[in-house]
Image (cartoon, grey):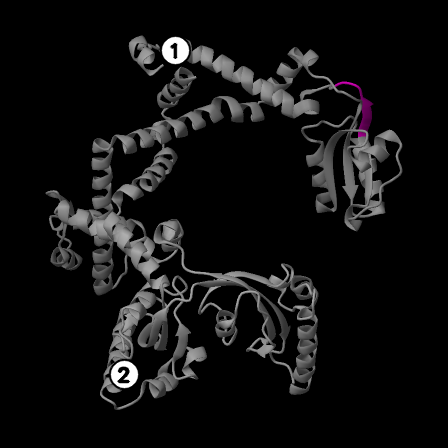
């Protein structure tokens, strides 16, 4: 099997498949993905994972002021200055945090409470925001922090040990945007439900399924699963964590409506090693996922003596001197002219000279770091056997798939004449267990159109399987559809009616309720390849592969090192 595998790879190389742009693009993607674990700062990744876990052990309540970061670098600089000035004004006593939040913050939910957000739930906020909140002392105001959604000042209100998680269910009766007179009726309803669920022998889950207006949990008996403190709306959150296991709360109101909670159980935060994989997966979904790679990239740039020359890039933008360097890596220089030519070829070069210089600088920096990564990957390929073996396996696998598709799978699907000849030469191998009805079934959007289509089909004579459907569509467009069918009795209601005398089936689609058969007949055995297309195609592919392997075994010399093979065995 391995010899056959390597023979196919050799044939793919002989066909030049390893030189195509599509192959190189696919292989590069695999190689880049495979290299990622090797090109990460493992120490930073471990540090971020441990910091993320440590945050889970503590509940931090914060207030914040948020302003937009703007659309341009200049907007961002102005926003930083504005928020930094506001921070100084609060610290100096010229204004209060609460007044500033109400006046400047764009977070509508918290500004009405003087900026109070509540508990920062680890993993629910951008990492820069979460990390700043956990690293700011109680009562102090953080420096300006950019979350990616805006700029923030964070004040830490209190810190306490995390309460772990609770597993609870609830019953909800909605009151949001409801008139007061109707709210009173909902209160009476929830009070009645409370009496039901607290009665001896009551089934909370059954009542929740029937009565709760929270569609997400109602179908699960009101079950909300496990959740941490700060996840739920207040006072739902504080009540659920204050209850005892097995306890049912009295009805209470939140911004959604009236709730009754049943708390099932509680637990502390699992050990770090048990949480590690979950934390790493969570890190991959936010900015922490790229931080170990960025750190390693900076280390590699320093190791390879990568240097960018902004002054040369600016000078080139002004005078187009082809000798000016953009950057060097391990003593190898890339000229600005090369990057400028790529930029112009892409059609993305700004006409304004200042903008052109800025775009050129950005592109040069990106290209430099791309070259740093490629240099690192080439070194990895030379020095790391595991990585080299994996990339070689991917390379050979891609080539084998492409050459097999060309010589076997795709050829079998397109070579209708060869498929038919193979069937005729081996038709004794293909049988039916029971007779089948074979026909073209033409569906029409109306009775009158069905009659017209039937007359036209009859005028064509014996239908050519290759062209019949196309001719019908050319004449009638989307008002008809043609299906080629072959089915035994009991397999299809329509063919049972058309071929085996069953009652006409009721239609679930009024558009295609009118249909008739063309060239319909019951056959006891397959007549052509298409009657058993799946089985014939599989067998034809097997034969094509056999012929191909015979050819390439004669074409390429195979030598097996028996001594090594014996050691492996």
Q: Residues within 10 Å of mark 1 (few under 14, many from 20)?
A: few
Please report the residue visible at 24 percent of the width from the left and 39 percent of the height from the top. 377
Q: Which residue is found at the position 63% from the left and 59% from the top? A: 220
Is residue 41 visible to us here?
no
Query: Relative to 309, is 241 on the left or the right?
Result: right
Q: For this rendering, which residue is in front, 379 or 384? A: 384
Q: State the extent of the magenta-drawn residues as a range.
A: 519-525
In this view of the protein, which residue sits in the foreground, 532 or 130? Answer: 130
Tag shown at residue 31: none
Q: Nearer the viewer, mark 1 or mark 2?
A: 2
Residue holding disc 2? 86
- Horizontal and vertical percent for residue 532? 68, 23
Q: Which residue is mark 1?
A: 555
* Marks 1 and 2 in Cβ contact (< 8 Å): no
**In magenta segment, residue 520:** yes
Residue 371 place in picture, x, y as percent: 22, 44
Pick the residue in front: 379 or 360. Answer: 379
Q: CA distance from mark 1 to mark 2?
A: 79 Å
**On screen, 454 above or below 227?**
above
């Amino acid at each position: 099997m391995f010899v056959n595998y390597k023979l196919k790879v050799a044939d793919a190389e002989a066909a030049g498949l390893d030189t195509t742009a599509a192959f190189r693009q696919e292989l590069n993607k695999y190689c880049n993905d495979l290299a990622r674990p090797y090109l990460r700062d493992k120490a930073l990744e471990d540090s971020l994972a441990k910091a993320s876990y440590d945050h889970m052990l503590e509940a931090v309540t914060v207030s914040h002021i948020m302003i937009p970061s703007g659309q341009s670098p200049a907007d961002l600089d102005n926003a930083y200055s504005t928020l930094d000035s506001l921070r100084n004004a609060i610290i100096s006593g010229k204004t209060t945090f609460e007044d500033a939040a109400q006046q400047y913050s764009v977070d509508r939910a918290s500004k009405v409470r003087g900026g109070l957000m509540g508990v920062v739930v680890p993993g629910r906020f951008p990492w820069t925001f979460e990390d700043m909140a956990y690293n700011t002392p109680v009562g102090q105001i953080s420096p300006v922090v950019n979350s990616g959604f805006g700029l923030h000042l964070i004040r830490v209100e209190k810190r306490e040990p995390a309460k772990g998680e609770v597993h609870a269910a609830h019953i909800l009766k909605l009151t949001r945007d409801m008139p007061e007179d109707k709210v009173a009726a909902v209160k009476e309803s929830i009070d009645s439900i409370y009496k039901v669920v607290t009665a001896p022998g009551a089934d909370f889950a059954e009542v929740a399924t029937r009565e709760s207006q929270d569609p997400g949990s109602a179908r699960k008996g009101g079950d909300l699963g496990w959740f941490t403190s700060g996840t739920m709306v207040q006072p739902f959150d504080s009540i659920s964590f204050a209850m005892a296991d097995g306890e049912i709360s009295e009805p209470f109101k939140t911004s959604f409506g009236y709730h009754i909670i049943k708390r099932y159980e509680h637990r502390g935060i699992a050990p770090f090693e048990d949480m590690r994989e979950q934390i790493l997966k969570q890190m991959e979904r936010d900015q922490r996922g790229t931080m170990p790679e960025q750190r390693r990239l900076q280390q590699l740039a320093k190791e390879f003596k990568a240097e960018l020359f902004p002054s040369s890039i600016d000078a080139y933008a002004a005078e187009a001197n082809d000798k000016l360097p953009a950057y060097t890596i391990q003593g190898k220089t890339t000229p600005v002219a090369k990057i400028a030519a790529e930029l112009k070829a892409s059609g993305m070069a700004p006409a304004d000279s200042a903008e052109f210089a800025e775009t050129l600088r950005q592109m040069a920096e990106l290209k430099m770091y791309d070259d740093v990564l490629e240099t690192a990957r080439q070194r990895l390929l030379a020095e790391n056997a595991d990585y080299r073996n994996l990339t070689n396996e991917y390379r050979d696998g891609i080539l084998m798939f492409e050459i097999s598709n060309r010589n076997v799978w795709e050829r079998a699907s397109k070579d209708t004449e060869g498929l038919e000849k193979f069937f005729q030469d081996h038709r004794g191998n293909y049988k039916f267990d029971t007779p089948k009805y074979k026909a073209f079934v033409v569906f029409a959007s109306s009775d009158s159109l069905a009659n017209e289509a039937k007359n036209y089909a009859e005028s064509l004579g014996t239908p050519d399987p290759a062209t019949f459907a196309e001719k019908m569509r050319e004449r009638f467009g989307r008002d008809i559809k043609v299906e080629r069918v072959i089915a035994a009795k009991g397999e299809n209601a329509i063919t049972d009616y058309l071929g085996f005398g069953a009652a006409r089936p009721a239609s679930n689609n009024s558009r295609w309720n009118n249909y008739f058969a063309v060239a319909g007949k019951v056959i006891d055995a397959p007549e052509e390849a298409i009657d058993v297309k799946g089985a014939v195609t599989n067998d034809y592919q097997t034969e094509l592969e056999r012929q191909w392997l015979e050819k390439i075994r004669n074409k390429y010399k195979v030598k097996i090192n028996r001594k090594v093979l014996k050691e492996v065995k």
